[in-house]
Image: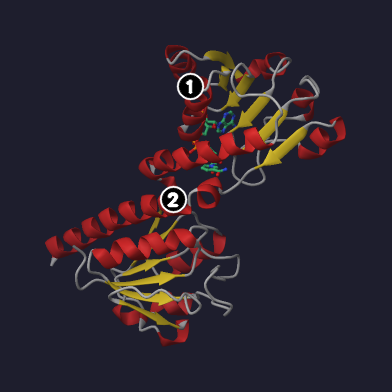
């Protein structure tokens, strides 16, 4: 239980509602900033403007998945008010106050380090990334179905990268009857790809491996689907790029060649915000609980 803990939750999207629900269930005292247009109320939670928050009482600050904007703006779909998180706000928090966000940026890193706060980027964690790969794969299947006139079954599908997302994508397409080839660079990845029954290839040979591709799914956050690679693909190939912005595809060249290439960021929040929020809520309640026990142990 998180009883007596003061947690401020700043803005976000539908995922944040699941985080609020989970932490409220655990008995935390919640301050909600950027939720004035949300009709729903939560037990133990008070909606406030940022100017009304007593930062000196906060044990935990939970930011939206993207952290902040480049100048501290907090994105929220539940308010039209402009909310800016500043270094001054963090300065007022107790020494132990910990900040959580999905990802970070230069601004957030700067104000956190200026004030010596602990910070956890949830999307860096393997458990979050693996759980998140489930809605990501479902979103990928949706996009492929929407953008092709053939079945996934029997398609030649190339998956690039064999990390947390790539492995889940390869498994799902294989289960639907696609012929799945996976490109990676580490020998242990190539061995595992083979062990799982997919066709492995080294990324050095990417150009010759895409000549009969129907669907190419990139998970590598690096320019890998270059114009040289795209020029070897059949024109009916569909490229879905899952890698974080700007993706790993030469989108301009793909368009010039008449090949459909789609950057598909944020699929969990789009196709399954409730599940994606539950994933974050579960991990946050565990991490905050651990943080609280460690602090009690020190007192
Ligand atoms: P990950 O576990 O770190 O896997 C990344 C893969 O890319 C690994 O196989 C890695 O291979 C490979 N890679 C990285 N840099 C490379 C390079 N320069 N050359 C060749 N291979 C390289 O990451 P993940 O969790 O699977 O996520 C993959 C991407 O998807 C990330 O950009 C993430 O932000 C994004 N993502 C998108 C969505 C969405 O909705 N679109 C959802 C979740 C995640 P090595 O091990 O050899 O480095």
Q: Is residue 194 visible?
A: yes
The dot on residue 175 is: 1
Q: Secondary structure at mark 1?
A: helix
Q: Nearer the viewer, residue 191 or 297?
A: 191
Circle 2 crowding by C-alpha within 10 Å: few under 14, some 14–19, many from 20: many
Q: Nearer the viewer, mark 2 or mark 1?
A: 1
Whether residue 118 appears in this view of the structure is: no
On the image, the x and y values in percent for residue 257 come to 85, 30
Q: Is residue 27 above or below residue 179?
A: below
Q: Is residue 29 above or below residue 65?
A: below
The answer to whether residue 110 is above or below residue 198 is below
Q: Residue at 53% x, 25% y: name it.
A: 173
Query: Residue at horizontal 39%, vertical 83%?
Result: 53
- Side (left or right) of 218 relative to 3: right
Residue identifier under label 2: 276
Q: Where residue 151 appears, x then y in whole percent? A: 63, 24
Quarter occupied by residue 227: top right
In screen coordinates, is 34 left or right of 70?
A: left
């Amino acid at each position: 239980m998180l009883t007596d803990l003061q947690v401020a939750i700043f803005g976000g999207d539908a995922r944040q509602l699941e985080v609020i629900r989970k932490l409220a269930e655990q008995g935390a005292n919640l301050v909600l900033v950027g939720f004035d247009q949300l009709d729903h109320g939560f037990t133990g939670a008070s909606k406030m403007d940022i100017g009304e928050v007593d930062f000196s009482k906060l044990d935990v600050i939970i930011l939206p998945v993207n952290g902040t904007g480049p100048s501290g703006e907090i994105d929220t779909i539940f308010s039209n008010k402009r909310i800016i998180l500043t270094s001054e706000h963090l300065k007022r928090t107790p020494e132990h106050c910990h900040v959580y966000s999905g990802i970070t940026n230069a601004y957030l890193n700067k104000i956190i380090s200026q004030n010596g706060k602990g910070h956890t980027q949830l999307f860096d964690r393997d458990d979050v990334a693996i759980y998140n790969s489930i809605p990501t794969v479902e979103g990928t299947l949706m996009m492929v179905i929407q953008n092709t006139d053939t079945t996934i079954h029997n398609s030649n599908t190339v998956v690039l990268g064999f990390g947390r997302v790539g492995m889940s994508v390869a498994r799902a397409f294989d289960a639907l009857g696609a012929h799945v080839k996976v490109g990676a660079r580490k020998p242990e990845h190539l061995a595992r790809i083979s062990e799982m029954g997919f066709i492995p290839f080294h990324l050095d040979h990417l150009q010759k491996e895409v000549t009969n591709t129907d669907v190419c799914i990139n998970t590598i956050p690096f320019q890998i689907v270059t114009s040289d690679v795209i020029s070897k693909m059949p024109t009916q190939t569909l490229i879905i790029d899952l890698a974080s912005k700007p993706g790993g595809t030469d989108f301009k060249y793909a368009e010039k060649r008449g090949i459909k290439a789609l950057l598909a960021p944020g699929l969990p929040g789009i196709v399954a915000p409730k599940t994606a929020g539950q994933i974050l809520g579960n991990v946050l309640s565990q991490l905050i609980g651990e943080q609280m026990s460690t602090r009690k142990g020190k007192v």
